[in-house]
Image (cartoon, rainbow, N blue to C red):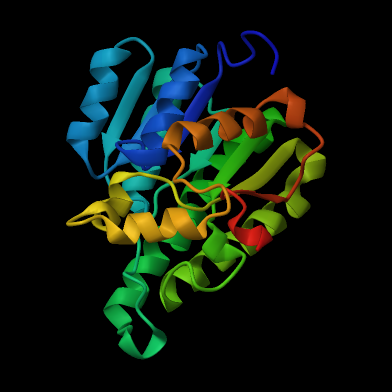
Amino acid sequence: MAQGEFTGKTVFITGAASGIGFAQANAFLEKGASVYGLDVDQAGLEKLVIKYPANFRYSRGSVNNQTDVTESVSRAIDTFKHIDIVCNTAGVLDGFAKTLDTDEVLWDRIMNTNIKGMFFVTNTILPFMLNRKSGVFVNMASIAGLVGGSGGAAYTASKHAVVGYTKQVDLDYCREGIRANAIAPGAIQTPMNAADFEGDGKTAEWVADETPAGRWAQPEEVAKLTLYLAGTASDYIHGTVIPIDGGWTAK
């Protein structure tokens, strides 16, 4: 990664208020980028404003609301003049619900956030990138997008959709200066997985034992991979999915 290569760049991050999105925002801000965050959790976003008052701005809203997305992208461009990198990170879990335990409400909630929201954000920002003939998307998949058993029916389906969508976006626009890749995290210790650590923590312990590396990862580790995929060192990496899973998918 070139020294200072993110200085002057603008990064749009969904799910920036906590977990991996928060770590990504911190990582880019530390490298000199400007970051615009979109999340429903205003308190988490305010923490980044306090730490980086000059280079971080945000909108409180949901990726599955087209109006929220359109308004936040407009504000980001008004503030920072362009968007160079998009981290489609926002996502929700389904509690490992099997298909017969998944009703339409749950199915729609998962799909609307995990894949439809990504579609909204991508289609809103992509035209601006095409005008500049430059742009990078780092989409958040999951090992549930590569194998079964890491989520319920809706979550697994949504993350497989992220993988396919990422590949197609890259294939369709790579000759116009666009790159799109996805990250497939395994066991990452974030607020979204807090339930695994509750009580005696046996679930978290089991997950660590089942992971070949023998531990959970921290969101900052995913953020470091994001920096690589967003940078010039990965310019020849197109339409791929990179697991960061402690060897889970190698089993």
Image height check: is 160 above or below 138? below
Instruction: Tell which residue pokes out farthest to the bottom in this image.
Output: 100
- Residue 207: image x %, image y %? 42, 58
In which quadrant will I find the C terminus? bottom right
Residue drawn where x is 28% and y is 14% of the image: 51
Q: Nearer the viewer, residue 25 or 124?
A: 25
Give the image location of residue 7, x and y in percent: 56, 11
Residue 64 visible in rendering:
no
Instruction: Indicate whether 55 appears above or below 111.
Output: above
Q: Is residue 45 visible?
A: yes
The count of marks equals 0
Residue at x-position 36% and y-position 36% = 16
Q: Is residue 56 above or below residue 223?
A: above
Q: Is residue 175 left or right of residue 64?
A: right
* Image coords of residue 40 (percent x, y): 24, 45
Q: Which quadrant holds the N terminus?
A: top right
Relative placement, left or right, of 126 versus 29 is right
Most foreground residue, 177 or 207: 207
Q: Quadrant of residue 54?
A: top left
Could you tell whether 172 is left or right of 143 in the image?
right
- Left-right relation of 42 to 180: left
Residue at (51, 33) in percent of width and height: 221
On the image, the x and y values in percent for residue 24 come to: 46, 31
